Image: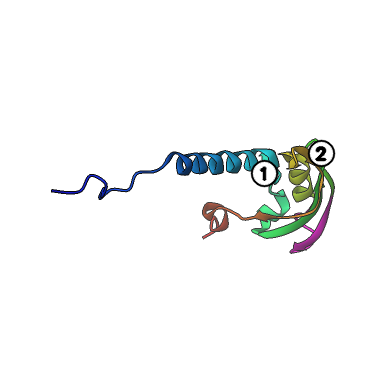
């Protein structure tokens, strides 16, 4: 017969349960108190393919640099680079300027973000790419 003082299963003690609960509460409170998050894209349009580029079967990409204000609007958008040059810049800028964000939060307060880079791609569908074949 087994000695009643020798239990094969360890039972948690009240102090150890309280310690675990306290750690969980502090962890949740720390996460909730920080309230930091990056900006999040919530709306906006994609680029409109320029008719001349589409008619000539030209594809490309434009890198746009911009900021996001505390109210989530794109500000100071400018072309950083374009390949090929001269076809897609205005369409990319128009698309990026239409984007709206939930602003970034730092310590629970909205903050502006600067020097965001986004690449806007212009690719034809397979039907458009091979329509003359």
Q: Give the label on residue 64, or none.
A: none
Reply yes or no: does residue 80 show up in magenta. yes
Q: Is residue 93 left or right of residue 122?
A: right
In this orientation, does residue 19 appear?
A: yes
Based on the displayed image, in which of its 4 quarters is residue 62 positioned? bottom right
Tell which circle, 2 or 1, labels the residue nearer the N-terminal end. 1
Q: Give the label on residue 70, or none.
A: 2
Tell whether label 1 touches label 2 (CB within 8 Å). no
Q: Is residue 127 left or right of residue 63?
A: left
In this orientation, does residue 58 appear?
A: no
Q: Is residue 64 left or right of residue 30?
A: right
Residue 64, given in percent of the width and then of the height, sits at 77, 55
Question: Which circle, 2 or 1, is nearer the viewer?
Answer: 2
- Please give the residue where the numbered disc 1 appears in the rendered image: 46
The CA distance from mark 2 to mark 1 is 23 Å
Reply yes or no: does residue 2 show up in magenta. no
Name the colour scheme.
Answer: rainbow
Question: Farthest left residue?
Answer: 1
Residue closer to the observer: 78 or 75: 75
Going 68% across and 39% down the picture, which residue do you hit?
A: 33
Residue 107, given in percent of the width and then of the height, sits at 75, 41
Residue closer to the observer: 98 or 57: 98
* Stretch of the chain drawn in magenta: 77-89
Residue 35, given in percent of the width and then of the height, sits at 69, 40
Q: Is residue 55 left or right of residue 8?
A: right
Classed neighbour count for the residue bearing mark 1: other residues with Cα under 10 Å, few (<14), some (14–19), many (≥20):
some
Going 54% across and 41% down the picture, which residue do you hit?
A: 24
Residue 60, given in percent of the width and then of the height, sits at 68, 60
Residue closer to the observer: 118 or 6: 6
């Amino acid at each position: 017969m087994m000695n009643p003082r020798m239990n094969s299963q360890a039972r948690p003690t009240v102090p150890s349960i309280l310690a675990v609960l306290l750690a969980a509460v502090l962890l949740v409170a720390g996460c909730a108190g920080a309230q930091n998050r990056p900006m999040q894209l919530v709306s906006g349009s994609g680029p409109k393919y320029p008719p001349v580029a589409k008619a000539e079967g030209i594809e490309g990409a434009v890198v746009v640099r911009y900021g996001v204000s505390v109210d989530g609007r794109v500000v100071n958008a400018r072309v950083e680079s374009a390949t090929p040059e001269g076809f897609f810049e205005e369409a990319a800028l128009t698309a990026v300027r239409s984007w709206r964000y939930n602003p970034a939060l730092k310590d629970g307060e909205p903050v502006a973000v600067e020097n965001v880079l986004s690449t806007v791609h212009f690719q034809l569908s397979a039907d458009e790419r091979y329509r003359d074949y």
